[in-house]
Image (spheres, rainbow, N blue to C red):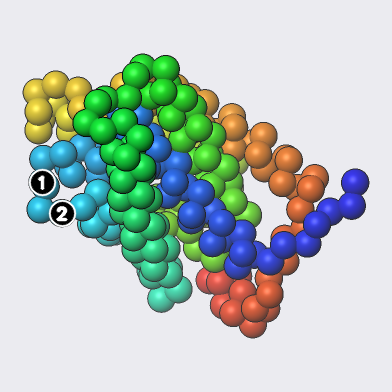
Amino acid sequence: MKKRKVSSEAVYIAGTIITALGTALLAKADLGMSMLVAPSYIISLKVTSLTFGEIGNIIQGIVFLILCLVLKKIKLMYLFSFVSGILFGTILDVWRIIISILSTQERGSFENPMWMRILLLVIGFLLNSMGVTLYFKTYLYPQVYEFFVKRISEEFCVRLYRVKMRMDIIGLLVSIIMSFLLFRELRGIGVGTVLIAFLNSIFIRRYDKIIDKCIEIYPRWKKFAEKFEDNNE
């Protein structure tokens, strides 16, 4: 099979849009968020003055500081992950508005039936895993969550999917604790969260193999790409 050439920059944009859409669909399904965005979602249910995306940016700042402490260093280009985070948060809020409008027009004030919520959960999960995989295939730094996984994997020579799985489980535990602290019950955590925690890394590996077989990714802006590669050494 002849591979199709796709620029790394296009893959990055596609990853951002797809991941944001998947996250928005998971929120609409309300059967449990993915672990890395669950804390942001839970806080957004309590702090209504800020959007889901805006709270996500704040939490990503905290995760970024933790990453710097773990690596014991910080480089200027690492800050690009904040650009990715802001872009993701903005697109996420836009997707949520679009989905809310479409849902209201279609069903009025009625809630989605369970079969539809399950369908949204499945589609959201598949899109989310695909988007994250695309993030990992580009030289551009993904939003802080995925960047954390990528840099820890590179720094300590641990397989990426293993770091991802551990991060997902930690995110699940943090989300459960946060939910009980804020609401004294589970909010934003459900069967979907548990399934994503244990299946996400598996699907990322499968998507990775499919992409490698079908697509050849290359940097269109080579000089710009070199700046990111230099910072990974």
The amino acid beneath tag 2 is: Leu
Mark 2 crowdedness (10 Å alpha carbons): few <14, some 14-19, many ≥20: few
- In the rendered image, the vertical position of residue 223 relative to residue 58, given as above or below: below
* Front residue of this view, candidates 159 and 190: 190
Residue at the extreme bottom:
223
- From where the camera sits, is residue 134 visible? yes
Residue under the point 32% across and 24% down: 112
Q: What element carries label 1?
A: loop
Which residue is the site of mark 2? 50
**Where in the figure is residue 194, as x and y percent of width and height?**
39, 22
**Where in the figure is residue 12, as x and y percent of width and height?**
56, 61
Mark 1 crowdedness (10 Å alpha carbons): few <14, some 14-19, many ≥20: few
Mark 2 in CB contact with mark 1 (< 8 angstroms): yes
Residue under the point 59% across and 79% down: 224
Which residue is the site of mark 1? 47
Q: Distance between the residues labelled 2 and 1?
A: 6 Å
- In the rendered image, the vertical position of residue 41 relative to residue 223, given as above or below: above
